[in-house]
Image: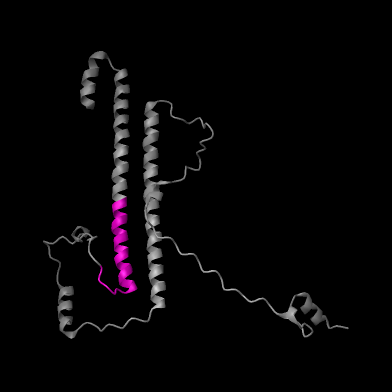
Amino acid sequence: MAHPGSRRSSQAGLPTSRTTGPASKQPPVKDPKPPEKRPMLESTLTATFVPLPPNLDITKDTGNLPRNRIERLQHIIATIDNQGLMVKENIIWLLDQEKERMILEAREIEQEMKPPPVKGGLPASEVDVVIKSLSAKADPGRDYNMKDVPTLNRNRQLPPNLSPRELVVSHLRTLIENGTGDLIGYNDHISGIRKYYADLLMKETASLELIGMRPEDRPKAAEASM
């Protein structure tokens, strides 16, 4: 009669002393599939595609459609504002994802390389100069704002034999410069479109106000709205 413990072990699929032969060999454990690398960000144009509001069903007539030109223009302006905000958030998200991809790639390259040589500390002849510079008071005639930071020279050739960390810093700065330009360019674009419809709304509102006025008062009101 078999011992109850051995029966439980065989039922649980665990090997026993009687299990011999090829059937006792376990299949080799395969290495897990390495995660796919993120593709490089080539453009932020995909940020312009944003989802529709969750409460909007374009297949049905909700009954809340604009009833006149003024409400239609107000709806267009509100849509432009919402669209512009979501597109800017998408651009920033894409830039943040590209930043993480750059840092991860540089970390992987650095792990495959030999440890870089340790650079020496600050020469003793420069210690006093650095301390004096850090202890100096701010110059009241100098602008310490970010406007003083020079723009990136895109035609500048990178020095050869840069370390992965130095190289990713240069790439990150290029990413920030390009991303800032995309945000400024899109903001100028969407602001021009919004101004166009805002001017139409102002003219339409002024025209509606003129309808309820006496004929002799309309020229004065028209001049005041211009």
Looking at the picture, does residue 147 appear above or below residue 211? Answer: below
Main secondary-structure element of the magenta-colored stretch: helix
The location of residue 174, given as percent across then percent down, is 29, 61
The location of residue 55, given as percent across then percent down, is 51, 40
**Quarter of the image holding residue 192?**
top left
Point 23% across, 17% down: residue: 217
Point 38% across, 59% down: residue: 96
Looking at the picture, does residue 135 appear above or below residue 212? Answer: below
Instruction: Describe the colour scheme in one phrase.
Output: one colour
Choose between 210 and 62: the one closer to the eye: 62
The location of residue 9, given as percent across then percent down, is 77, 79
Reply yes or no: does residue 181 show up in magenta.
yes
**Quarter of the image holding residue 144?**
bottom left
Looking at the picture, does residue 185 appear above or below residue 138? Answer: above
Going by the image, does 73 lie left or right of 157?
right
Point 40% across, 51% down: residue: 90
The location of residue 211, given as percent across then percent down, is 31, 18
Q: What stretch is highlighted in magenta?
A: 158-182
Indicate the quadrant containing the C terminus: top left, top right, bottom left or bottom right: top left
Indicate the quadrant containing the N terminus: top left, top right, bottom left or bottom right: bottom right
Going by the image, does 113 lie left or right of 21?
left
* Outermost residue toward the right in this view: 1
